[in-house]
Amino acid sequence: MSRAPRAAEARRSWGEDDSATPILHVDMDAFFASVELLEHPELRGRPVIGGGARGRGVVSAATYEARRFGVTSAMSMAEAARRCPQAVVLPVRHGVYSEVSQRVMAILGEVTPVLEKVSVDEAFLDVSGARRRMGSPTAIGRWIRSEVRDRLGLPASVGIASTKFVAKLASSHAKPDGLLLVPQAATQDFLDVLPVGALWGVGEKSQAVLERWGIRDVRTLAATDERRLEKILGPAAGRHLWELSHGIDPRPVSPGREEKSVGTESTFFDTITDREHARRVLLDQSHQCAARLRAAGLRGRVVVLKARGADFTTVTRSRTLGDPTDLARDVFTVVESLFDALPTPGGGFRLLGVRVEGLSRADDGVQLLLDDDPRRGAPERAADAVRERWGRGALAPASLLRPRDGEGRAALIDGRPPPAPLISGLSHPARPHTRSVRSSVKDSARGPVSRTAGPSLARSSCYPASHKAGEAGPPSPERPVRAP
C-alpha cells in the first residue's frame, strides 16, 4: 500500500491527448484486502486488516476504511489494534493472492507482451504495439479496469503517461478505483502541484534538508539550478531529483521473465529506529519467503537482505548457503547475521526486505548432507498445514508475539497467559543448513526461544489456550507433531 504524499489538486483532468503516452501503470487497490472481501462481502465498507491474529506479527494489508485510522503495512498488529480496535482481522493467505495475481497478469498479457510485473499487484505496460488492435492508451486502460472488475471482481487503478515514473504517480493519484491520464504536454504542470515527498528518492531526511532551503514542492525543485541541488544533496541524488522534477525517466518497460527470486519487502511511513522491531519484521518476512518457496516447490541458496534509510540510501547484502533451503530458520539465520553487521542509518529504516535467489525445484535431486536430519523441516511444514486450515495467525514464532515482561517471558495476550506449544521441538539441536554461516543468536532479548540455527516454530512459545499460567514449557515435549 503506497503512502507517498499526494496532492488533491493533481486528481483532475489534465487533458485528453494520449497520442504520446504509451506507458500504463496498473495498480490493484488494497489488493490483499480486496481479495479477502470477495469471500467476505458482508465486510465491505468496514475496516479490515490482513495480518496475524491476537496482536501477533505485522500488518500485510488494510482496506481504505482501516487506513483512515492510520493503519499501514508493516505496522505491528498490536499498534493497528490500538489505532483501529473495531477492525476485522483476517489471516493472510499468500498462496491465494499469488493465484489471483497470476489471473490479473494474464488479463494484462492479453493487451501486450511488453509487460513488466513490478510486484504481486502492479505492473507497467507499453501499449505502443496494441493501439491498432485495441485503440488508444486511454481506451486500453478502461478495458483493463473493466475486465479485471468483470472477471475477478477486483478494483484496479490505472495511470497513463509518457514515462514509467509519471505513470506510477498518475495511478497513485487515480486511487481508489480510477484512471488518470497525464498528457505529455501536461507532464510538468502535473508534477509542479506535487509535494517533493512524492518523488522517488525523497525520504524524511532529504525532505527536511530541502525544506531548509525553501524547497517544498516540485515546482520549486524544478526551478532550482541542478548544480545547487547537487551541492545540497550530493551529485547523484541532486541530479536524480532534478531529472525527476522535469519528468525525465528514460527507462523502458522491460518484459517480465521467469521469476529468479522469491522475496518480500515493506516500506514504513514512520521509519523504524528500534533494531528489535526491525528484527521482528525481518523474521516475519523470512517466514513469508520460506512459506512461498515451499508452496511453489522451490528451494533457494542465496539469501539477500535489503535495507533503505530515511534518506533513501539503499543497501543490499547477500550470502550463499552451502545447500538450497526452503526453511525460515535457515533464511533468518543468514538475514540476522547480515542485519547484525548493518548499522542503523540516521533517521532509521524506511524499508526492509528479504529475498531468496538461486532457485531450484525441490525435487531436483538435491542430496542431503550426511549429518543433516531429514526431520528438521517437519515443524515448518506442519505449521503450513495448520495455517492452511486455520489461517496465518494460528501459529507464529515467539519473537512475533507481544513484547516480553520483565522476566523475559512472552507477555500476556488479551489478559490470558500464552498458550502451550502446538508444535513441540526436536530433542536435539538442529544443525545449521549452511557450511559458511554460523548462528550467533542471542535469545536473552527474545524470551523463551532457544534455537541453534535461526527461527524455528518447533521451538516457539506458541501455546494453546488450555495451558495454565505458571506451567513451564510445553506439556508434552517428547511428542512432536508430525507433518501430515
Image (cartoon, rainbow, N blue to C red):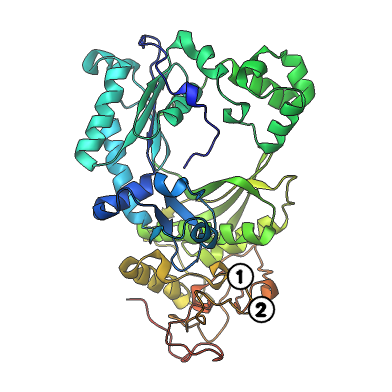
Q: Residue furthest right?
A: 231
Q: How crowded is mark 1: few (under 14 residues within 10 Å), some or many (20 or more)?
A: many
Three-letter residue code for mark 1: Pro
Q: Is mark 2 on a helix, strand or loop?
A: loop
- Give the image location of residue 310, x and y in percent: 68, 41
**Residue at 46% of width from left, 45% of height from top?**
68
Q: Mark 1 points at which residue?
A: 403
Specify whether residue 297 is in view.
yes
Residue 1: x and y in percent read 46, 42
In the image, is 315 to the left or to the right of 190? Answer: right
Q: Which residue is drawn at 25% across and 54% down?
A: 42
Q: Residues within 10 Å of mark 2 (few under 14, many from 20)?
A: some
Which amino acid lies under the numbered mark 2 shown in the image of this protein? Gly
Q: Is residue 172 left or right of residue 215?
A: left
Report if the CB atoms under discs 2 and 1 are less than 8 Å apart.
no
Work out whether residue 316 or residue 278 is closer to the camera in this orientation and state it: 278
The image position of residue 134, as x and y in percent, is 23, 18
Is 12 located above or below residue 184 in the figure? Answer: below
Q: Name the residue under label 2.
A: 408
